[in-house]
Image: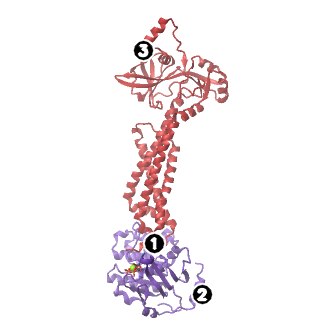
Amino acid sequence: MNLAYRDIRHNLLRFVMTCVGLSLLLGIEIMITGVYGGLIDEALRQARAANADLWVIQPGTNGPFAESSRIPGDTREMVARTYGIERAGAVTYQSVQTTLEGVPLRLYIIGYELNRPGGPDHLVAGRDIMRKRYEMIVDQSAGLALGQEVPLGTHGHKYTIVGMTRNNTTSAGDPVGYLTLRDAQNLQFELAPPSERREVARGGALQTNDQINAVIAKVSPHVPRDEIAAALSRWKHLTTLTQEQQENLLSTFVIEKSRKQMGLVMVLLVIVSTVIISLIVYTMTMDKLRSIATLKLIGAPDRTIVGLIVQQALSLGLVGFFAGLTLVLVFLPYFPRRLVLEPASIAVVFVITVVMCLAASVLGVRLAMKVDPASALAG
Amino acid sequence: MADPVEPALVEIENLSKHFGEGETRVDALRGVSLQVFPGQIVGLLGASGSGKTTLLNCVGCILEPNGGRMTLDGDVVYDDRWLRSDLRRLRLEKVGFIFQFHNLLPFLNCADNVGLVLQLAGFGAAAARARAIELLDYFEVGRHKDRMPAQLSGGEAQRVAIARALANRPRIILADEPTASLDSHRAGIVMDLLRKIAVEQHAAIIAVTHDEKIFGRFDEVFHLRDGQLDADAAGGRRFEPTDMQTSARHDRAEC
Ligand SMILES: Nc1ncnc2c1ncn2[C@@H]1O[C@H](COP(=O)(O)OP(=O)(O)OP(=O)(O)O)[C@@H](O)[C@H]1O
Ligand SMILES: [Mg+2]
């Protein structure tokens, strides 16, 4: 017969209450890994959403997301002609802010060439951009409606929302908007009307807007990517990153800091949880001292007694863990931040929980080992 | 009745035990010697604080004496120090305890309280339960087998505890005021039971008591006074040790 289980059943209410408390603690730990997973996901989402194999960017920069990268607008044609490249598309990235009925709205604008790589992957409503000017696809999180017109840029041109994406935000949480490359270039490089008039008056030619931030390329599956990247690197005014390099750059530079912060919070939480579980196990053992003394008296070996304590600690941890996981899953949709729960990180929290419970049993086990069997006889 | 040629089950020679040191030192046992033979029920009497419980705890290997020699069922277990490292196993196999308060595990029902010691001794779960219920029936508490200890009266709980103490057929049974929480009728039943076990299982039973009603039921009575046995008690033994004791000791050296 399992003594741990019998004792739990005998004191079921207390066990359940303890598990509820513990589940909150472990739920927070799971949540933190979810927030962290969400951060990585968001940081990489822009790079992943582009669905690229290769990124052609300005040399000496870390790509269009980590810093600014500017290359000539005709780069796309050069890249497209390279052996092994199947498709290529020029893209621009920029943040814009506008005001809609007095409420500020920040958008992260991606300019792309229609029917080339770089555009939105999957629409949840509306249609693709079809006209070369003044149409926009935007993420649902911007809170805009199909058909709504949004003024952007110093000229205040209005852009009509024609399509919607979902879960397409920057790591800062700004919704992503897609424009045609031409619109985006104008938005990025256009001068405010007074400056423009001054330039014209000065007799200066209007500066060309034909710059882009990167070229996204899809490669043939039959040609090794490294080979293509090497071929592209011959042009001294360009640098090529594979998608993998791009993701590594983003995860090292962009999220290194949050990784440390969350790691710290996680370590503190684990310490706090271990202390709390230790105290719970200790008091549970305290309450059973007489039974433990009796067990020793009637000849139960140490392993029976250690088993009783360790199994109870583990049951607490496991029930708390799964209850916490359920809580997180149930409340996931109401969470203000997007959580990404990777099975691997949930497994890590699970292993941490088991280790915490084992560590927390030490105190209780030591107490139980010290119990004098004669104390069972004291009236 | 006991067979006079059998060796003593419990043999204590010059056992001493003290608590504390210096000013606070209490000599609970000072050179106690006694023997209990199979089939014998002996009573341990004495004023409060005379050392009865201490003696019982030493015999049960719960308390380490400070000197002397102790032989249980042919095994020298103590000779100025413990000679066995697995005292708990020894208790499981050879010693049954009956306490003044029942000491049942509160989180197990009656059948499992008894079954547990059987399982610890190697019985399978089903066999342990069957034998536990058999024992409970024997002590007329079989109908309470699925009740928790808290749901029993004092006398019922005591009988369950006795069933537990006897489950592994221990040859040495130590009872500390087993009838103190029972009325005289119940006390009589318990004493009859102990007698039956002593006879049937050839067990040696040492029972501490203050209860004058049951004095007459002992084969022999030892009086403790300030940690020493009264002289008259020492002379009142019915059985003398024989040479077989020595050979029995060798026979059982491995177990
Ligand atoms: N753990 C202990 N520490 C210190 N002194 C103890 C301890 N146990 C017993 N004593 C002392 O040893 C003496 C003998 O105690 P013991 O419990 O054997 O008496 P007893 O004969 O069983 O008494 P009672 O009839 O009241 O149960 C007493 O003076 C008691 O105070
Ligand atoms: Mg006593």
Crowding near the residue tagged with mark 3, few <14, some 14–19, many ≥20 C-alpha atoms within 10 Å? few
In the drawing, what numbered circle is on residue B82?
none
Q: For mark 2, give the secondary structure.
A: helix
**Which residue is depicted at the point 38% across and 22% down?**
A99
The residue to which callout 2 is attached is B247
In front here: A11 or B221?
A: B221
The residue to which callout 3 is attached is A155
The quarter of the picture where the C terminus of chain B appears is bottom right
Residue B68 placement (x, y as % from top left): 52, 83
The hue of chain B in the figure is purple
Q: Is residue A331 above or below residue B150?
A: above
In front here: B197 or B129?
A: B197
- The answer to which image quadrant residue B231 occupies is bottom left
Residue B249 placement (x, y as % from top left): 58, 84
**Which residue is depicted at the point 44% across and 77% down?**
B22
In the picture, which chain is red?
A
Q: For mark 3, give the secondary structure.
A: loop
Q: Mark 3 and mark 2: span between their CA atoms? A: 114 Å
The residue to which callout 1 is attached is A373
- The answer to which image quadrant residue A218 occupies is top right
Residue type at mark 1 is Pro
Question: Is residue A293 something that shows in the picture?
Answer: yes
For disc 3, the chain is: A
